[in-house]
Image (spheres, grey):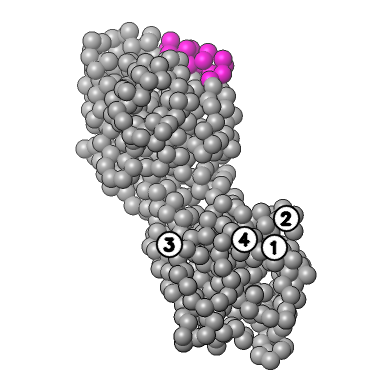
Amino acid sequence: MVVGTSGLTASDVLAVARADARVEISQEARAALAAAREIVEALAAKPDPVYGVSTGFGALATRHISQELRTQLQRNIVRSHAAGMGPRVEREVVRALMFLRLKTVCSGHTGVRPEVAQTMADLLNAGITPVVHEYGSLGCSGDLAPLSHCALALMGEGEAEGPDGVVRPAAELLAEHGISPVELREKEGLALLNGTDGMLGMLIMALADLETLYKSADVTAALSLEALLGTDKVLAPELHAIRPHPGQGASAANMLAVLKGSGLTGHHQDDAPRVQDAYSVRCAPQVAGAGRDTLAHARLVAERELASAVDNPVVLPDGRVESNGNFHGAPVAYVLDFLAIAAADLASIAERRTDRLLDKNRSHGLPPFLADDAGVDSGLMIAQYTQAALVSEMKRLAVPASADSIPSSAMQEDHVSMGWSAARKLRTAVDNLTRVLAIELYAASRAVELREGLTPAPASRAAIAALREAGAEGPGPDRFLAPDLAVADSFVRSGRLLAAVEGVTGPLA
């Protein structure tokens, strides 16, 4: 990935964070770095104090720092701000955070020397991942503690994970890879810490995961509709055209594509006549569609943030170095919370369909709990308990972090975004949504197979066959269920469910 002064995409971030793509700095970016550094050094030589260049930080910004103490000042801000606690943050999150900070550094608005930027790229290319902890960011003045732990590794201090996955002193890892630790100069310590990079990286990864999961949810909803002998008439394009939310239309079209050729749909007037399906079946496109539209809005925010240079102070093209509030994480924090709400609702409606499949009074002829010999066998009773527990947690995680604020830095930083916290809980929500959909898939596939004498849609047959080939067994007496659910989870998470279905339907929307 070539980092210039602008133009990085979400795909670039994913390639570096998840696929270990190599990073290079363009000549354009090197020139911009050098030009901005000249401005900072000229200001540093003047007697007038400039925030971040020759002053303290935050509530201590009123102190003018003499030249002989400025290297110590930059080193101290990194050391003191590397105050995270709790479990380690995932490797992909740290790599995204580092790459996004490098992106801003290369914009030419931070005043960092080219050799510091190169060292950041060298760490990424060497597979050295600083140890970053769960707690420490309030999402304002950027993700201070997480970014500080990364900057600490650039200085050859603290701990990092090597390419072999072993955590060791950063100094040892840098030496092994021929990387010289940096000695930070005026403004550089501050420039490495002031950014929304952690929350933005997690937003970009969540968007990628949720795009797959929303398509997967259309598939599991279609399988449940089939298993419940529901009608696909509610998916007709003309019905969704008169309420033109784009996500709703896309979800309905996906479900209709999966159900094409099904012999199970439309049995409302059989032995147990009904006029309409339950909301959890009939309104699946409306709920999933609203979530899809939320994804579209969040993607727009992520693209804008990717195009931003987030630092304080910033170097402007006319030579000014100005303080600002662009590090505030509110824009990113809001959509992170919004996505957690949408994910919780999607999980909730999926759980309701699963429960309906297991209830003999509402499943239209399926055995209780889809058990082989109900009473002797419990079937999938407790799988739905697990699903319900996951959904309940997701509802708690849907409580917005961005509605909170806690003052810090002697009331200088008196309103914060809590965007890092919003991102951390969204990652858990995305994990749980995957598990919820996996359980619906497992139940719906068993229910479809129990509809003897009726032929499911070709896409449904392909999905079920691929799930069985992956190792999740079909109907039968009770067995140790956790391994089967783990297989279903991996099947959804890896995208194999989607691949099996799209092999029949073509690409889903």
Vertical arrangement, residue 379 with respect to residue 503, above or below: below
Q: Amino acid at mark 4?
A: Glu
Q: Residue at x 56, y 15 (%)?
A: 27
Circle 2: element type: helix
Q: What segment carries the magenta color?
A: 25-39
In the rendering, which numbered label is found on residue 503?
A: 2
Asked if marks 2 and 1 touch (Cβ < 8 Å), the reply is: yes
In terms of sequence position, does the residue under pointer 3 or pointer 1 come before the other? 3
Marks 4/2: CA–CA distance: 15 Å
In terms of sequence position, does the residue under pointer 2 or pointer 1 come before the other? 1
Q: Position of residue 481 (x, y in %)?
A: 47, 69
Marks 2/3: CA–CA distance: 32 Å
Q: Residue at x 36, y 24 (%)?
A: 173
Q: Position of residue 430 (x, y in %)?
A: 48, 55
Magenta span dominant secondary structure: helix
Residue 339 in view here: yes
In terms of sequence position, does the residue under pointer 3 or pointer 4 come before the other? 3
191 left or right of 267 in image:
left
Q: Residue at x 29, y 25 (%)?
A: 157
Q: Position of residue 133 (x, y in %)?
A: 32, 41
In the rendering, which numbered label is found on residue 462?
A: 1
Q: Nearer the viewer, residue 439 or 155?
A: 439
Residue named by callout 3:
394
Residue named by callout 4:
469
Marks 3/4: CA–CA distance: 30 Å
Residue 310 in view here: no
* Mark 4 residue crowding within 10 angstroms, few (<14) / some (14–19) / many (20+): few
